[in-house]
Image (spheres, grey):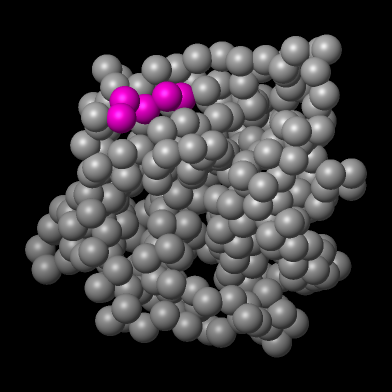
Amino acid sequence: MKSPRQPPPASLAGLRRGLVLRANSLVVTVYGDAIAPRAQSVWLGSLIGVAMLFGLSARLVRTSVFRLTADNWFDVTRVGRRSFYGLSPQGVLRVQHADRRIYEFNLPTWDGRWTLLLLDPRMRASMRQQLKRELLWESFGQLSVGMFAHPHANHRSLREILAAAGAEAQVAVLTAQSLERYAQQPLQTLMHDTFKLAKVEQAWLQFIARFAPLDAQVERLGPSDAFYARTLLIHEYRRVLLRDPNLPQALLPEDWPGVRARQLCEHLYSRLLAPSEEFLCANFLTTDGALLATPQAISQRLTRPFGT
C-alpha cells in the first residue's frame, strides 16, 4: 500500500480554507461517495491514513468510526488484529437516499404538483423527530408541526423512510396543485420563508467562489490531490444541498446560483474521477484485498436520469 500522508499542495489550500471538517461527516462522505458503490468493507488503518490528508488524527477517526458503528451506520469484520468497516443495511439505505439527491445533476420539469405529508398528531415524539430529520434531508419543507411538502418527491425514498420508521400507518400522503385563478405570489413567499432561500443562496455563492478556480488546476493534479479535491467538492456540495429544497425553477428567484453550483460540481467531478479512483484503488485495503476498480454505480452517476 502506498502512503497517502503527503499534504495537498499550496495551490489547493483555498479549497480547505475556512471549512470546519468534522470527522463523522467526512467519513460518511468518503463512504457514500467512494466505498458504498463497491459494497466492500475497508480496513480502519486505510481510512486513518487517508483521513490524514484532511488534517484528521488517528484518534479522531477511530472515535468517529466507533460512534457511527454505534449509530448503526457500520458493521465491523475482524480479520486477525485488523478491523474492517462496511456499511450496515441501514447505512446502505441512508447512503442510497443521499446518493439520489447528490448525483441527480439533471432536474426534472415540474408538473405543478406537490406531495403533502400529514403526520398523525398522536405519533410518538421519537418517531416524529426521526421522520423530521429524514424528511428535511429529502428536501421536504415543514409548513407546520405536522405537515411537510415537496414539489417533486422521490417516492421510492419516501416509502423507504416511512417503512424504516414504522410510520406507514401514521402518515397520510397527498398530492396538491395550485389553482390557476388564484395568485401565485403567496406560494412563492411561503416557499421563500419556509426554505430560508436567502441563506441557501449565499451558501451556493460561497461554494462557487471556493471551487470554480479548481477547474484550471485539474490537469496538473496527481491521484492523491485529485482525491483530496473530489472529496472536498462532494463534502461541501452535500453540506449545502442538505439546506437546499431543490425547488422547481418556477418557484426560485431569477439566476438562482444553485443551478450554476450543480453544473460546476458535475463538471469538476467528471474531471477528477479517473485520477481520484486511481488513488482509491492504491490506498484502500478491504476484506477482499484491493478495492474494486471503478464500478458502474460510480461511472454512471454523471449520466443517470432523475429518480432512478
Q: Residue 97 location in percent, x, y? A: 46, 36
Q: Residue 221: name its quadrant.
A: bottom right
Q: Is residue 68 above or below residue 107?
A: below
**Number of callouts in the render?**
0
Q: Residue at x 30, y 30 (%)?
A: 121
The single residue placed furthest to the left in the displayed view is: 80
Depth order, front residue of 10/154: 154
Q: Residue 39 location in percent, x, y? A: 35, 41
Q: Residue 75 location in percent, x, y? A: 20, 50
Whether the magenta-drawn stretch holds residue 262 is answered as no
Look at the image and tell me in which quarter the C terminus lies. top right
Depth order, front residue of 234/201: 201
Start and end of the magenta stretch?
117-121
Q: Residue 111 location in percent, x, y? A: 73, 16
Q: Is residue 249 above or below residue 83?
A: above
Depth order, front residue of 81/234: 234
Q: Residue at x 64, y 67 (%)?
A: 229
Q: Residue 165: name its quadrant.
A: top left
